[in-house]
Image (cartoon, coloured by chain):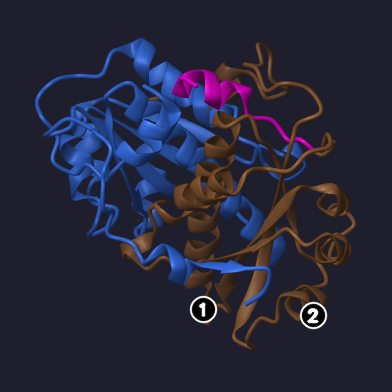
Chain colours: A brown, B blue
Amino acid sequence: METWDCIRARRNVRQFAEGSVPDEHLDQILEAGRRAPSSRNWQPWDFVLVTDRQRLEEQAQVWVGAGHVAKSAATIALVIPKADDDLRRDWAQYDLGQATMAMMLAATDLGVGTAHAAVNDQDLACRILGLPDDRVCAYLVALGRPDRPLTPIRKPDRRPFDDVVHRERW
Amino acid sequence: METWDCIRARRNVRQFAEGSVPDEHLDQILEAGRRAPSSRNWQPWDFVLVTDRQRLEEQAQVWVGAGHVAKSAATIALVIPKADDDLRRDWAQYDLGQATMAMMLAATDLGVGTAHAAVNDQDLACRILGLPDDRVCAYLVALGRPDRPLTPIRKPDRRPFDDVVHRERW
């Protein structure tokens, strides 16, 4: 898919159709995340790919807004070190956001729907994935066949362009 | 450009060639950011587009790593509200990361080079842009003609795939 179409076609997909996502597509999505830039190239992330149905259903319990994970074809858990100061915490979050968008666009390009979720019950999330004590499961990115095709959205539900964009100064 | 090529062609560009970026390209890059997803669609961001050379040179002083902003064709300042708690701070950073990657990929697709920078001297950054007291200039995304073409990178300088990616659990 052309990049500009892909950027406009990405949307949150929480209603997944039946069907798996081929392994080579999952790997390409993960590769997009691996390539994301990060502060001084520190690459603070680990990605845990989950496809086991029972584990997906358990993961869906980590936040009230993570229910769609249960029926996803696969979910990528974004794992980072526990932050020791505010600045590193900010950068890890910012860099995870970049990796997330790269993965979501790579997925859209392959016709795969995505919707990420925050993690509230950190103990549960870490237990499900067997994370070391020094790690946090920051977000989940659920993947699956979209309920309807991903095509460019003409009028996204966003603040108007001229409200968001300022010229030269505020 | 095809999305998968674009994802692999994006790289940090801090050496800019002569030449401006057309207004319609700048608007398309900003539109990509506007469309980014955010927590509960709160869209915490404002984008300040700067093209004035003197202002770009001033902006380059906000951090030791922002020198490339001075010679950029344009720079987008990413502005967010001052955070009142850790959770909203995390989400704003994460969402800004998503918007940043959308803008960088939209730029790459148009042959425009990008490199973002953190902001250390917040007072200076806010004064240059005339920001209200309740806002923070979180990052700068510099844009310009790349010194060499943006083409897919075969071996990115990243941790190995099998080191980053875990299957089913840690």
Q: Tell me the distance, in whole angstroms, between the alpha carbons under discs 2 and 1.
A: 21 Å
Q: Position of residue A121 (x, y in %)?
A: 83, 72
Categorize mark 1 by other alpha carbons within 10 Å: few (<14), some (14-19), many (20+).
Answer: few
Q: Nearer the viewer, residue B130 or B1?
A: B1
Q: Which residue is mark 2?
A: A123
In the rendered image, the vertical position of residue B144 relative to residue A156, given as above or below: below
Q: In screen coordinates, is A106 left or right of B71?
A: right
Along the viewing direction, whichever of B119 and B105 lies nearer the viewer: B105
A48 part of magenta stretch: no
The residue depicted at 81 percent of the width and 39 percent of the height is A14
Left or right of B64 on screen, residue A29: right
Which residue matches tag 1? A85
Q: Is residue B73 visible?
A: yes
Subunit ID for the residue under disc 2: A
Q: Residue furthest bottom?
A: A133
Q: Amino acid at mark 1?
A: Asp
**Image location (x, y in percent) of residue A163:** 60, 22
In-front residue for pair B129/A158: A158
Q: Which residue is drawn at the image coordinates 68% and 25% (left, top)?
A: A158
Q: Is residue A3 magenta?
A: yes
A98 relative to A96, above or below: above
Residue occupying image coordinates x 67% and y 70%: A137
Which quadrant would the N terminus of chain B be assigned to in this image? Answer: top left
Position of the C terminus of chain B, as image quadrant, is: bottom right
Quarter-wise, where is residue A134 in the image?
bottom right
Using the image, determine if residue B156 lies above or below residue B80: below
Task: Point out the tag, 2 or 1, that comes first from the N-terminus.
Answer: 1
Element type where label 1 sits in the image: loop
Amino acid at circle 2: Asp
Magenta-drawn segment: A1-13
Residue A79 falls in image quadrant? bottom right
